[in-house]
Amino acid sequence: MQLDPLVLAAIAGMALATYFTRFIGYWLVRRTVVTGRLAGALEAVPGAVLTSIIAPMALATGPAETAAAALTVLMAVRLPLIVAVAGGCLAVVVLRAVIG
């Protein structure tokens, strides 16, 4: 296997960009008082990122996965998160066996 210098440069550049954005974020938050709307917005980021990752996969893979995602959301409203995740995994296995 031969290493391409252009690929290594691209990987190094992406690593640097990732580190830089994280460092700047931590630096800004440490020097800024986070209250009110900004605090609410920052608290919503993890859920928004998770939704943006899961929603396309749940809607593009098949009916069993879409139904399992919907059941997982319904379980997450009422039950603890770990129970909802386990129930979602079980639901996708069962629905794939039933629906195909």
Image (cartoon, grey):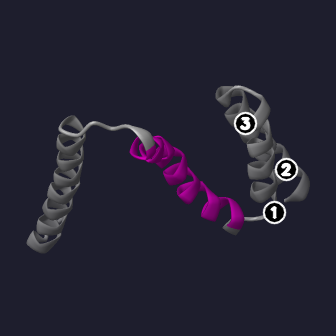
Mark 3–mark 1 Cα distance, whole angstroms, equals 20 Å
The N terminus sits in image quarter: bottom left
The secondary structure type at the circle numbered 1 is helix
Residue type at the position of mark 1:
Pro
Circle nearer the viewer, 3 or 1: 3
Residue 3 position within the rendered picture, expressed as x and y whole percent measured from the top left: 13, 66
Among numbered discs 3 and 1, the one appearing first in the sequence: 1
Q: Crowdedness of circle 3 by 10 Å Cα count: few (<14), some, many (20+)?
A: some
Left or right placement of residue 25 versus residue 58 in this view: left
Left or right placement of residue 70 versus residue 53 in this view: right
Among numbered discs 2 and 3, the one appearing first in the sequence: 3
> What residue would you read off at disc 2?
95
Asked if the magenta segment contains residue 16, the reply would be no
> What residue would you read off at disc 3?
76
Residue 60 position within the rendered picture, expressed as x and y whole percent measured from the top left: 68, 68
Circle nearer the viewer, 2 or 3: 3
> What residue would you read off at disc 1?
63
Q: Is 100 located above or below residue 44 in the figure? A: below
Residue type at the position of mark 2:
Leu
Residue at the (72%, 33%) spot, across then down:
84
Q: Crowdedness of circle 2 by 10 Å Cα count: few (<14), some, many (20+)?
A: some
- The residue nearer to you, when weighing 67 against 24, is 24
Left or right placement of residue 22 versus residue 62 in this view: left
Mark 3 vs 1: CB contact within 8 A: no
The residues colored magenta run 37-59
Q: Crowdedness of circle 1 by 10 Å Cα count: few (<14), some, many (20+)?
A: some
Mark 1 vs 2: CB contact within 8 A: yes
